[in-house]
Amino acid sequence: MVDNFKLWCRNEISKLLGTDVGQEFSNYLFSIESEADVREYLFQLLDPDDGKVKQFVEEICLNWQILKKPKPQKNEKQKERSAVGPQKSASDGEIKKQTVNVKGEQSPIKKKSSHFVSLYSDEGQARTSVRLPGRHPCECLGQKHKLVNNCLQCGRIVCEQEGSGPCYFCGEIVCTTEERELLTKNSKRSQKMKEKLLDSWNVKANEDEELKSRKATELKDRLLEYDRTSVRRTKVIDDESDYFATDSKWLSKKERKILKDKESKLQQLKHGSRRDKKVTLDFAGRKVIEEQATEKMNEIYKSAEEFLESTLGHNDGSNHPRYVAEPPVYIEDDQPASGKKQKSTKPKAKESSRNTLRIQDKELLEMTDEGKCLSMHQPWASLLVCGIKRAEGRSWYTTHRGRLWIAATAKQPDQENLKQMEAYYRALGEKSRFPEYYPSGCLLGCVDIVDCLSQEEYNEQ
């Protein structure tokens, strides 16, 4: 009867899960001691909201109580009496004493025995692992489900939940040893198995190809639409000429002076003394409100942009800073036969000396060196030129960007200081080669200034 119950239980669980379950499920279910544990285990394994599952659990609990109910067994004394025969009954006084003693004794309360299940045992694995019907990606690495095999292409560990078939990472066929031996044989059975393993993967591959093709077609149509409408979607923001290069060679003296004034106002607002800041005392709200210079700085930036746009708008082509000149063309002058130059009857336009001396070459501007130099003590000067020291602090602000020459002062460096600085930069993880000697009183080399930051901005970065 117990075997029939286990078989029926196994078949019903297989129907509800949609997949074949092992015999260990029914064996573990029959080994549970209390009805509450049976319900808890089944509701964890199956869907508790399903009506079929609830009906199945009730039937399981009913049959489980009947099968687990202990059969009445004969007492040893009754067995002896039945074997020997009727004996002389005890006297009335002895019966009373026995009844008194039984009433006086208190029966001990039987505690509910707790059943401990180790997670590493077969019962624990049966509780914690649930296998879904079909092939699904699983990252248990063969710890919760049985191992199928390793992928010979990428090494992925394939468990029983992923099942035999193409690898979810590289697409290589992964199967058990028995299936691998069958696939090596050129038979009809091996061909059918191979088609079965590749069937689900081909459907998924076709869906991926359709999705990629649709996205590529949409991108092609969008790019063709951009090309047809010829809409400009890019904008070059030249911060160098807008904010830093206030002394641009393409601006007049008046325009440079206006931009210099705006730059000085910005520097005063950004790096000015705290004594010049205004503070509002709110006695009612008990607050101290400090005036922020952000709005004023934004106004100055906006006015500078409008001024630059206006100057670029009214300048002619030869004075435009974004103008790239065309290559010169040689035009041969027709000389008269007599060898004398004929005067042109057309009046020549009067050209200023500024226009005639202008060399408008973009590459020449990039190679321009203003010759600015900074003197430093050793060993910091050599470390800065070698690229080991990346930042240099000063108490003043500079608008210079680009090449800056570094000169070493005449002061001789201290050997202890040299060793300390080299040890400091080695501790920071610097693997560059340190200079062998640190000369003094000479020009060492040049560096490129990228930006000049305040102490607060530098600490934030």
Image (cartoon, grey):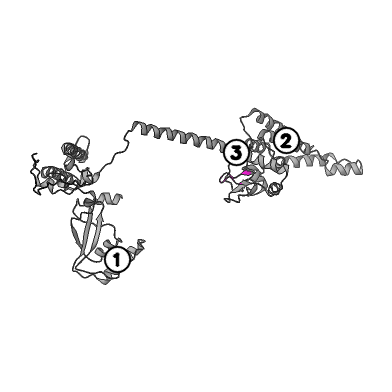
What residue would you read off at disc 2?
Answer: 11
Magenta-span inclusion, residue 167: yes
Residue 287 vs residue 193: left or right?
left
Magenta-span inclusion, residue 178: no
Q: Secondary structure at mark 1?
A: helix
Q: Nearer the viewer, residue 426 or 44?
A: 426
Q: Which residue is located at x 21 percent, y 69 percent?
A: 440
What residue would you read off at disc 1?
Answer: 421
User: Disc 3 vs disc 1: which is toward the camera?
Assistant: 3
User: Could you say where residue 297 lies in the image, as x and y percent from the top left?
Assistant: 20, 40
User: Could you say where residue 216 lies in the image, as x and y percent from the top left?
Assistant: 46, 36
Q: Earlier in the sequence, mark 2 or mark 1?
A: 2
Residue 38 vs residue 308: left or right?
right
Question: How far apart, in angstroms, are the residues tagged by discs 3 and 2?
Answer: 32 Å
What residue would you read off at disc 3?
Answer: 202
Identified by mark 3, the residue type is Asn
Identified by mark 2, the residue type is Asn
Q: Is residue 116 visible?
A: no
Q: Earlier in the sequence, mark 3 or mark 1?
A: 3
Q: Which residue is located at x 61 percent, y 51 percent?
A: 152
Identified by mark 1, the residue type is Met
Q: Is residue 92 visible?
A: yes
- Give the residues in magenta: 165-172
Q: Secondary structure at mark 3?
A: helix
Q: Quadrant of the N terminus?
A: top right
User: Disc 2 vs disc 1: which is toward the camera?
Assistant: 1
User: Disc 3 vs disc 2: which is toward the camera?
Assistant: 3
Question: How far apart, in angstroms, are the residues tagged by discs 2 and 1?
Answer: 79 Å
